Image (cartoon, helix red, strand yellow):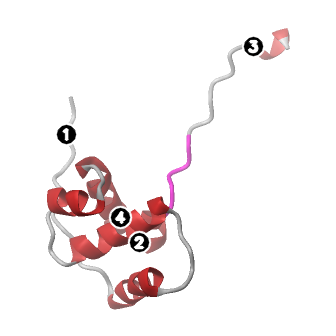
């Protein structure tokens, strides 16, 4: 079973941190999933471990580490968005339809 590198922590850019704090204190509504991602990034930035951040927001360690790794790899927008879902394989061949 291949293992991935441990999450080493992150530090948010100043403008990203300000944007996330504004999202939490703003009057715009957001889904529970989006709120959890925003809060997770802020907690990881404050130095929380993956386990502590996951417990604080009511999530799983794997998801918390994934959010942090996505931020480090591609930035804030990617960390807050969903990964595209794979297209299902058709059950019937095209000639039968």
> Residue 7 placed where, x, y %?
19, 58
The quarter of the displayed image where residue 67 is located: bottom left
Q: CA distance from mark 4 to mark 2?
A: 6 Å
4 and 2 marks in contact (CB < 8 Å): no
CB atoms of marks 4 and 3 within 8 Å: no
Cα separation, mark 2 vs mark 3, equals 40 Å
| Side of 71 where 48 appears, left or right | left
For image coordinates 18% across by 59% down, the residue present is 50
Question: Tag 4's secondary structure?
Answer: helix
Residue 15 is a magenta residue: no
Residue receiving disc 4: 73
Q: Earlier in the sequence, mark 2 or mark 3?
A: 2
Circles 3, 1 touching at the beta carbon (< 8 Å): no
Disc number at residue 75? Answer: 2
Specify the quadrant of the image occupied by residue 9. Answer: bottom left
Mark drawn on residue 86: none
Residue at the disc numbered 1: 3
Does 55 appear above or below 27?
above
Relative vertical location of residue 61 with respect to residue 92 in this rendering, above or below: below
Where residue 11 appears, as percent x and y from the top left, is: 23, 78
Q: Are marks 2 and 1 in contact (CB under 8 Å)?
A: no
Q: Which residues are magenta?
A: 81-85
Query: Are there few (<14), some (14-19), or many (20+) residues within 10 Å of tag 1?
Result: few
Q: CA distance from mark 4 to mark 1?
A: 18 Å
Residue at disc 2, secondary structure = loop
Helix, strand or loop for disc 3? loop
N-term mark: 3 or 1: 1
Please tell me which residue lies in front, 29 or 76. Answer: 29
């Amino acid at each position: 079973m291949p293992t991935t590198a441990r999450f080493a922590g992150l530090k948010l850019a100043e403008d990203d941190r300000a944007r996330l704090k504004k999202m939490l204190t703003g009057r715009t509504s957001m889904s529970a999933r989006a709120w959890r991602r925003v809060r997770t990034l802020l907690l990881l930035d404050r130095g929380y471990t993956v386990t502590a951040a996951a417990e604080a927001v009511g999530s799983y360690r794997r998801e918390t580490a994934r959010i942090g790794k996505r931020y480090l790899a591609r930035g804030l927008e990617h960390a807050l968005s969903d990964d595209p879902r794979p297209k299902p394989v058709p059950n019937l061949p095209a000639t039968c339809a």
